Image (cartoon, helix red, strand yellow):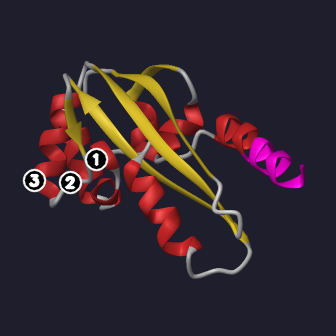
Amino acid sequence: MDMAVEKARTIAVTLERAIVLAADTIVVLDGKILGKPDDSTQAKKMLQSLSNRMHEVITGYSIFDRPSDNVITNYELTRVWFRELEPEEIENYVASGSPLDKAGAYGIQDDFGAVFVSRIEGCYYNVVGLPLAKVYTDLKRSIAHNIM
């Protein structure tokens, strides 16, 4: 959430009037944060560690209103289960380049990432990177606050 606040604030202070939304997503496996992999070797290791396991996807977001400087910060947590991944599947996915810019080295919306997931508990859109329903209700609250 701190990262989302900083992202939103960095943009918002340059604007006279706007609502700025920023988010940051992490993957957590056994209490360890899996960010974006540095390279293909790290991406393969991350995917191997997620294979046949449950992990959590947490997205922190911040809504920054200008000029009031009202800030709403929140988060969403979704549990995701991977089926057992075959080494060739991991190799092919990493070779596509897609996992290199994603927390946990996968995107549920990707061709491969979608078929790695056997089950989710919580918000699908959170795993994509933005928990839409929760953000929407917070945006409504932010707008209502500024009208009153």
Q: Position of residue 123 (x, y in %)?
A: 57, 28
Q: Secondary structure at mark 1?
A: helix
Contact between marks 1 and 2 (CB within 8 A): the answer is yes
Q: Label 2 to label 3, Cα distance in Å?
A: 8 Å
Report the span colored magenta.
139-148
The residue wearing badge 1 is 105
Q: Nearer the viewer, residue 55 or 71?
A: 71
The residue wearing badge 2 is 37
Q: Residue at x 36, y 27 (%)?
A: 56
Crowd band around label 3 with a 10 angstrom C-alpha radius: few (<14), some (14–19), many (20+): few
Amino acid bearing label 1:
Ala
Amino acid bearing label 2:
Pro
Crowd band around label 2 with a 10 angstrom C-alpha radius: few (<14), some (14–19), many (20+): many
Q: Position of residue 96 (x, y in %)?
A: 31, 59
Q: Label 1 to label 3, Cα distance in Å?
A: 11 Å
Mark 1 or mark 3: whose residue is earlier in sequence: 3
Contact between marks 1 and 3 (CB within 8 A): the answer is no
Q: Is residue 141 above or below residue 117?
A: below
Please, which residue is most extreme toward the right here?
148
Q: Label 1 to label 2, Cα distance in Å?
A: 6 Å
Note whether residue 108 is visible: no
Amino acid bearing label 3:
Thr
Which quadrant, please, contains the N terminus?
A: top left
Task: Please say whether residue 25 is one of the residues in the magenta stretch.
Answer: no
| Mark seen at residue 41 | 3
Q: Nearer the viewer, residue 53 or 16?
A: 16
Note whether residue 92 is visible: yes
Q: Is residue 114 above or below residue 142?
A: above
Q: Position of residue 140 (x, y in %)?
A: 80, 44
Q: Secondary structure at mark 3?
A: helix
